[in-house]
Image: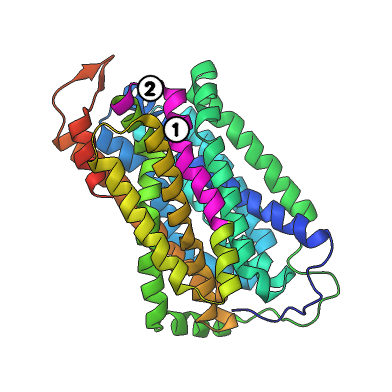
């Protein structure tokens, strides 16, 4: 992990402002990641498509996000997080406007892909800012805090967006979101700096040095193990919270869209609690593996209860989702572990590799669930949209 930060550095207000603005990019990444989950019916109706196609449409975000992580890791180290974050959040705004305006499915794919590409810098860029502006001992905790802010974005992308969709329609809602992203891009360009003023203890790495670091990362077995673990912990949350959780809760419990979105947000709330908590516990005990193993067991157990125990009251499901989020949030430790197992020149590339697996697993999980739903569809239709019964959802969610 990058450890070139003096112990006294990071004290004061400016590092926290820089971190907060960078973290808002991750907030927007999650916010835009989950919004399709509260407009599934509208997307199926307006584009005249099935659940599998909607799953693929939402997954285009992840295709772009995952494929760009390693290149972005290198570019952040080369050109700095300020430039990369500014351009990226502006690109996501352009993608949102295209998605909102089009009636063509392929242009909708393009819009979601641009949103994913723009969102891809948020996590890597913010971790770079943390590594430069704060002491190394705070990295895991601040990574957790960044993840927690991302979960706040995901929660904001559920019930609040559902209310906007009900009031103004999904297209107008996406235009408003794009406008907010443009304002954030301006704020980052004006305020954020790549490093504290007067700092002379680091240099811009050459492309040759960065590529050497990347090659070392790709040869490190431990990094690949971390990447697979991180992807396995994240994919179920991504599929449930971002797309299929709201329709499932509506079908299983007869909830309205807003009520279902609020219930699905318990998973995100748990994630928001577990991210800084897991980082703090890991830093306190000085170990990464025990919290990660415990988190994986909690995630597996709670999902199994939600899917396989019939007749659970809604309150119990909400509690299980909360606990599941706390367990799954330990994945944030994977990024600290990846940095610690690689040289400083490959720090962002290592984070990018882990995030590639995370987003790749997430991208695969969403259309997979939709495909299984279509296979188990009983022919039910409502207002021209396919309706999936609880049996179909249980088979679909089994993959998680």
Res. 70 in view: no
- Residue 76 position, x and y percent, is 60, 67
First in sequence: mark 2 vs mark 1: 2
- Residue 195 position, x and y percent, is 76, 69
Q: How is the image coloured?
A: rainbow
Distance CA(mark 2)–CA(mark 1): 9 Å
Residue 83 lies, with reference to residue 50, above or below; the image says below
Q: Which mark is residue 255?
A: 2
Res. 123 in view: yes
Whether residue 126 sits left or right of residue 350 in the image: it is right
The structure residue drawn at horizontal position 66% and vertical position 63%, both measured from the top left corner, is 81
Q: Secondary structure at mark 1?
A: helix
Mark 1 — residue? 263
Which residue extends farthest top? Answer: 383
Q: State yes or no: discs 2 and 1 in contact (Cβ < 8 Å).
A: yes
Q: Secondary structure at mark 2?
A: loop
The structure residue drawn at horizontal position 30% and vertical position 33%, both measured from the top left corner, is 312
Question: Is 32 within the magenta?
Answer: no
Whether residue 174 sits left or right of residue 292 in the image: it is right
The structure residue drawn at horizontal position 41% and vertical position 64%, both measured from the top left corner, is 294
Whether residue 39 sits left or right of residue 8 in the image: it is left
Q: Examine the image and state in which quarter residue 397 appears.
A: top left
The structure residue drawn at horizontal position 50% and vertical position 47%, both measured from the top left corner, is 270
- Image quadrant occupied by the N terminus: bottom right
Front position in the image: 87 or 291: 291
Q: Examine the image and state in which quarter residue 191 appears.
A: bottom right
- Residue 231 position, x and y percent, is 38, 61
Number of residue marks = 2
Magenta stretch bounds = 252-275
Front position in the image: 48 or 384: 384
- Residue 169 position, x and y percent, is 49, 20
Front position in the image: 149 or 52: 149
């Amino acid at each position: 992990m990058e450890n070139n930060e003096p112990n006294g550095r990071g004290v004061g207000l400016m590092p926290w402002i820089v971190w907060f603005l960078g973290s808002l990019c991750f907030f927007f990444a999650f916010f835009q990641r989950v919004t399709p989950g509260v407009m599934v019916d509208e997307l199926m109706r307006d584009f005249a498509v099935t659940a599998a196609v909607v799953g693929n449409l939402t997954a285009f975000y992840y295709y772009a996000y995952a494929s760009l992580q390693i290149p972005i890791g290198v570019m952040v180290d080369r050109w700095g997080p300020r430039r990369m974050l500014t351009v990226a959040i502006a690109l996501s705004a352009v993608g949102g406007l295209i998605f909102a305006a089009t009636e063509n499915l392929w242009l909708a794919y393009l819009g979601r892909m641009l949103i994913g590409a723009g969102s891809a810098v948020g996590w890597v860029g913010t971790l770079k800012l943390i590594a430069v502006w704060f002491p190394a001992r705070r990295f895991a905790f601040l990574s957790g805090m960044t993840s927690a802010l991302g979960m706040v974005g995901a929660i904001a992308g559920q019930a609040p967006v559902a209310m906007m969709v009900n009031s103004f329609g999904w297209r107008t809602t996406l235009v408003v979101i794009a406008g907010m992203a443009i304002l954030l891009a301006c704020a980052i360009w004006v305020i954020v700096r790549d490093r504290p003023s007067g700092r002379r203890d680091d240099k811009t790495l050459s492309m040759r040095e960065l590529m050497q670091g990347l090659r070392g990362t790709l040869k490190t077995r431990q990094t690949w193990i971390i990447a697979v673990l991180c992807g396995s912990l994240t994919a179920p949350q991504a599929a449930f919270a971002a797309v299929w959780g709201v329709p499932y809760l509506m079908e299983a419990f007869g909830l309205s869209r807003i009520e279902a979105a609020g219930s699905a947000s318990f998973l995100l709330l748990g994630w928001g609690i577990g991210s800084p908590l897991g980082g703090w516990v890991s830093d306190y005990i000085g170990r990464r593996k025990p919290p990660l193993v415990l988190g994986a067991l909690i995630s597996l157990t709670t999902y199994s209860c939600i899917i396989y125990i019939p007749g659970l009251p809604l309150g119990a499901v909400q509690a299980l989702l909360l606990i599941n989020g706390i367990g799954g949030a330990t994945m944030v430790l994977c990024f600290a572990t990846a940095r610690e197992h690689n040289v400083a020149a490959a720090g962002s590339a290592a984070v990018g590799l882990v995030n590639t697996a995370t987003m790749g697993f997430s991208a695969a999980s969403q259309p997979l669930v939709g495909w299984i739903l279509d296979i188990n569809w009983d022919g039910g239709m409502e207002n021209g949209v396919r309706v999936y019964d609880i049996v179909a959802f249980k088979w679909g969610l089994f993959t998680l």
